[in-house]
Amino acid sequence: MRRADRLFLLIHALRGRRHAITAQQLAQTLEVSLRTVYRDVADLQRSGVPIEGEAGVGYLLRKGADIPPLMFNPDELEALVVGTRFVRAFGGERLGRAATAALLKIEAVLPPELRARSARTRIFAPQLDNRIEASGLIDALHAAVSEQRVLRLRYRDGEARASEREIEPLCLTFWGGSWTLGAWCRLRADFRSFRPDRIDGYAATGERFAESRERGLDAYLRSVGGQGLEPA
């Protein structure tokens, strides 16, 4: 995390609080050391940010220094909380951390009654260690999609037949119980949808691809629109 982003998140973690938050809590939230929290708070105080408190006691923003609350109604806020829980459970580790940080920023500037509402929502998405999301595979595939990196896969189809594929990954789709990876398959010379739970191994080839009109995301979406998903 860039230092500027960390300082921004630290300030948001302090906003709207009636009681001090400890350096230990801040360190856990930001995933940094206590020493880093102490240094960042001291730097912000020297730069004029009205943070009160001290090490061993906790910190909060001086009363009156807060910004106006975000204007969410209760249903909008509950939708954000539930969405965050689903991203943390199913979106992979990287997006899960980002969702947690985003919700922290939102809750930090809410009035107390809405913050309490966000804690009461009863729609949950448990994070289970045996899910494919916990393996790091979704993060790796997401990175390959974002960076347009060609992947080499060892893949099993629905009848457990193994094959080696080189693919140009275009998107990830979550179906409420399983993921699919939309890609251009060089072996089949066509679009295919791969199930991550059938990937036995993968590696980046070192090659990057450029999307084209015929082999890009828009073309893939047109190919599967209304027709279901072509087996890999």
Image: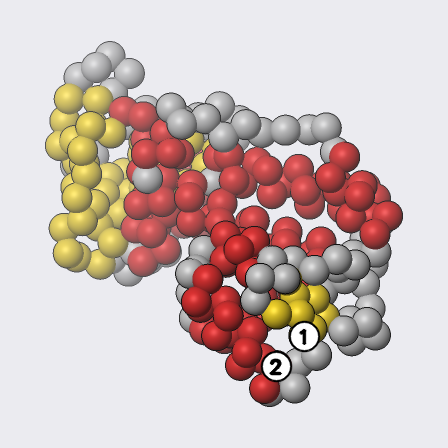
28 vs 198, left or right, is right
Does 147 sit left or right of 176 as displayed? left
In the image, is residue 60 above or below residue 152?
below
Mark linked to residue 45: 2
Q: Please state which amino acid type lies under the numbered disc 2.
A: Gln
Q: Residue at x 50, y 58 (%)?
A: 27
Residue 139 % position (x, y): 36, 45
The secondary structure type at the circle numbered 2 is: helix
Image x and y of residue 211, in percent: 32, 57
Q: Which mark is residue 80?
A: none
The answer to which quarter of the image holds residue 26 is: bottom right
Question: Is there CB contact under 8 Å for labels 2 and 1?
Answer: yes
* Residue 34 appears anywhere in the view: yes
The picture places residue 118, in percent across and down from the top left corner, at 75, 42
Residue 65 x %, y %: 78, 76
Mark 2 and mark 1 lie on one chain; the one further toward the N terminus is 2
Is 212 situated left or right of 10 in this image?
Answer: left
Label 2 to label 1: alpha-carbon separation: 6 Å
The quadrant the C terminus occupies is top left
Specify the quadrant of the image occupied by residue 82.
top right
Q: Residue furthest front?
A: 56
